[in-house]
Amino acid sequence: MNIITLQAGKRGGKLCIRGLRITVYDVLALLAEGVSSQEILEDFPELELTDILAVLSFAADRERRVHVIAVE
């Protein structure tokens, strides 16, 4: 299942979670502000813990790829 999705016209073409109107950036920004995963799940009941973990995995993988490109 593709958790991180991209649909033209949805949230300005930003990466979303499972086609919802919640973006990867939204979740990362909340986590960066110190909001816990549990609090996010309470505020966005349509999300699941696997969604938050997918966002973190996506961000880590993207960072790794940016680093590899910069080193090459």
Image: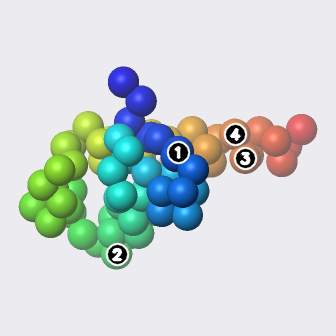
Determine the secondary structure under disc 4.
Answer: helix
Comes first in the chain, label 3 or label 1: 1
Could you classify mark 1 by the number of other residues whose Cα lies within 10 Å: few (under 14), some (14-19), or many (20 or more)? some
Task: Identify the residue at the far top of this view.
Answer: 1
* Figure check: 49 above or below 30: above
Residue drawn where x is 10% and y is 61% of the image: 42
Q: Which quarter of the picture shows residue 38?
A: bottom left
Choose between 57 and 16: the one closer to the eye. 16
Residue 63 position in % (x across, y down): 62, 48
Closer to the camera: disc 1 or disc 4?
1
Q: Which mark is residue 65?
A: 4
Determine the secondary structure under disc 3.
Answer: helix
Could you classify mark 3 by the number of other residues whose Cα lies within 10 Å: few (under 14), some (14-19), or many (20 or more)? few
* Figure check: 21 above or below 33: above
Q: CA distance from mark 2 to mark 4?
A: 25 Å
Determine the secondary structure under disc 1.
Answer: loop
Report which residue position mark 1 lands on: 6
Tell me the quadrant of the picture where the C terminus can be found.
Answer: top right
Q: CA distance from mark 1 to mark 4?
A: 19 Å
Report which residue position mark 2 lands on: 33
Comes first in the chain, label 1 or label 2: 1
Closer to the camera: disc 3 or disc 1?
1
Q: Are marks 3 and 4 in contact (CB under 8 Å)?
A: yes
Q: CA distance from mark 3 to mark 1?
A: 20 Å
Residue 48 position in % (x across, y down): 19, 43
Q: Are marks 2 and 3 in contact (CB under 8 Å)?
A: no
Comes first in the chain, label 2 or label 4: 2
Task: Identify the residue at the far bottom of this view.
Answer: 33
Report which residue position mark 3 lands on: 66
